[in-house]
Image (cartoon, helix red, strand yellow):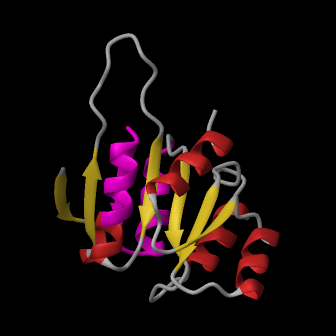
Amino acid sequence: MSIGAGAGGGVVAGLAAPAATGVAAAPHVLAVDDSSVDRAVIAGILRSSRFRVTAVDSGKRALELLGSEPNVSMIITDYWMPEMTGYELLKKVKGSSKLKKIPVVIMSSENVPTRISRCLEEGAEDFLVKPVRPSDVSRLFSRVLP
């Protein structure tokens, strides 16, 4: 795992799955959460499922990374974050001709049906209620990623 300061002072942690010779590269998941604890938990679950993970601490940082990293297979983001919510990030991704095909999954510790519906109507692939469990991740990725 490598941790460094990102542009704008955000913390960026990269977790890479081991490379396997002759096998397709692991899907790259962008995990977005302002909570360092939640970022570590979701990155750990994803890493144990053999995904390549880049974890960032804000929606703004996620958009910066998406501008320079074209090979993101999925975005998993917290709903409530300062500066830009996960919902606002979802709208920006789905409103971009370059990014709109990337599946976005929203996570929240609050189970609010109207919020869940709004995210799904806006194009979210799924909405997970925290704490996210390994079974949530395997169910989600077997359905969403080829």
64 over 2 or under it: above or below: below
Q: Nearer the viewer, residue 105 or 71?
A: 105
Q: Where is residue 79 in the image (x, y as percent from the top left)?
A: 55, 79
- The percent position of residue 100, horizontal first and vertical second, equals 70, 54
Disc tally is: 0
Which residue shows up at 35% across the image and 60% down it?
Answer: 55
- Magenta highlight: main SS: helix
Quarter of the image with the C terminus is: top right
Res 51 → quadrant: top left
Where is residue 43 shown, x and y percent of the image? 34, 57
In this rendering, is residue 99 above or below 116? above
Is 44 placed left or right of 102 in the picture? left
Q: Which quarter of the figure has residue 50? A: top left
Whole-percent x, y for residue 107 in the image:
55, 72
Q: Which of 112 and 18 is in front in this view?
A: 112
Q: Look at the image and give the residue range highlighted in magenta.
A: 41-70
Q: Residue at x 17, y 52 (%)?
A: 2
- Identified at 60% across, 62% down, the residue is 105
Residue 92 belongs to the span the image colors magenta: no
